[in-house]
Image (spheres, grey):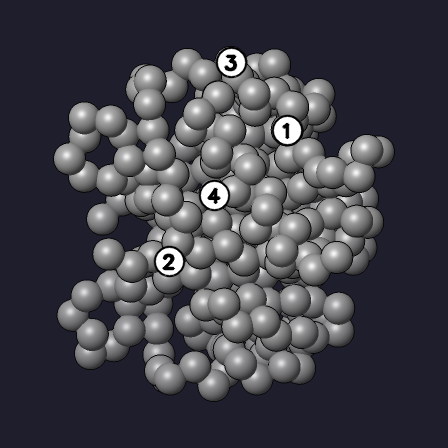
Amino acid sequence: MEEQIDLVGKAFTDHYYHLFDNDRPALSSLYRPSSMLTFEGQKILGVEDITAKLTSLPFDQCQHVISTTDSQPSTFAGGIVVFVSGSLQLPGEEHHLRFSQMFHLVPIVEGNFFVQNDIFRLNYG
Amino acid sequence: MDPDAVAKAFVEHYYATFDSNRPGLANLYQDGSMLTFEGQKIQGAQSIVAKLTSLPFQQCQHNITTVDCQPSGAGGMLVFVSGTLQLSGEQHALKFSQMFHLMPTQQGSFYVLNDIFRLNYA
C-alpha cells in the first residue's frame, strides 16, 4: 500500500510538471472549483483563477527538475499529500530557482486525482 | 477563529517544543500519524518521537521564515513551513521545508496526522 502511494504521487507530479512545462493551460484539468493555491503567499481559489495565475506568470518557458518527492495517505477518503522539492530553470537565466511545493490530491474516480490544495514556495538563499 | 492564526500558533508551539523539550512532541502525534524525515518513513507517535529524540544533535533552534496554510477538508489543516535550523556548534544554519496535515482533537486542539520534513540543500 505504501509503495502504491509513492508510485501514485510520483506519477502525478511527473504529469503535473510535464503539463506545466509544455502546456500550461492544460493544468486546468487538474483543478476544480474547490481547489486552493497559495503561490508565494498569494491565495487563489478555484480552477479558473488558479489557471489564470499560472498562465500569467512572467515567463513563457520553464523547466522543472524534481529532486525529491515524498507521499503519504491523507485519510481524506483516498487522498494523498505529496511534498516536492526541486529547481526551476527559466530560459536566459543563469541560475536555477529552487522551490518546494506540496499538493493534496483527492480522488475523482479510480486512479484519477485532482489537486484540492497546492502550496508553492521558492527557496531563497 | 482565523485559520492563519491557528496555523501560526501551532507551528510556534511545535518548534518551541522541538527546541526545548523534544520528548514533549509525543502530545502532538497519535497512533495513525506518519512522518517522512529526509525520505525515511516512520509510523505512529512512539516511533516518531523515538526518531526525533534520537537525531544526532542535543540542541537546535528553528527559525521560521514562511508559514502557509489551507483547509484540507473534514476539519483538517495543511501547513507548509520554511525556515532554518541552527545546530549548536555549527557555523551555518541548515535550511528546511516541512509540511504538516493537522487534524482536530476532541479537546479542541490539533494533532499531526501527516508530517514531511526535507532539508533544502544549496
In-image side of A1 versus A99 (left or right)? right
A119 or B40, nearer to the observer: A119
* Residue A78 seen in the figure: no
Mark carried by residue B28:
1
The residues tagged by marks 2 and 3 sit, at their Cα atoms, a distance apart of: 30 Å
Q: Amino acid at mark 3?
A: Ala
Is the C-beta separation of discs 3 and 1 under 8 Å? no
Query: Do dots 2 and 3 share one subunit?
Result: no
Q: How far across and down, in percent of the image, does residue B119 sit?
A: 35, 40
Residue topped by disc 2: A99
> What amino acid type should be assigned to the residue bearing mark 1?
Leu
What's the distance in space between the residues labelled 3 and 1, CA to CA? Answer: 13 Å
Check disc 4: other Cα within 10 Å, few if <14, some if 14-19, many if 20+: many
Dot 3 crowding, Cα within 10 Å, few <14, some 14–19, many 20+: some
Q: CA distance from mark 1 to mark 2?
A: 28 Å
Label placed on residue B50: 3
Q: Which residue in the protein does label 4 denote?
A: B98
Report x, y in % for residue B54.
41, 14
- The amino acid marked with disc number 2 is Phe
Q: Nearer the viewer, mark 3 or mark 1?
A: 1
Q: Vertically, is B39 above or below A97?
A: above
Evaluate if marks 3 and 4 touch, with contact meaning CB atoms under 8 Å apart. Answer: no
* Marks 4 and 2 close (CB-CB < 8 Å): no
The amino acid type found where label 4 is placed reads Gln
| Residue at 38% from the left image edge and 19% from the top image edge | B55
Alpha carbon distance from label 1 to label 4: 15 Å
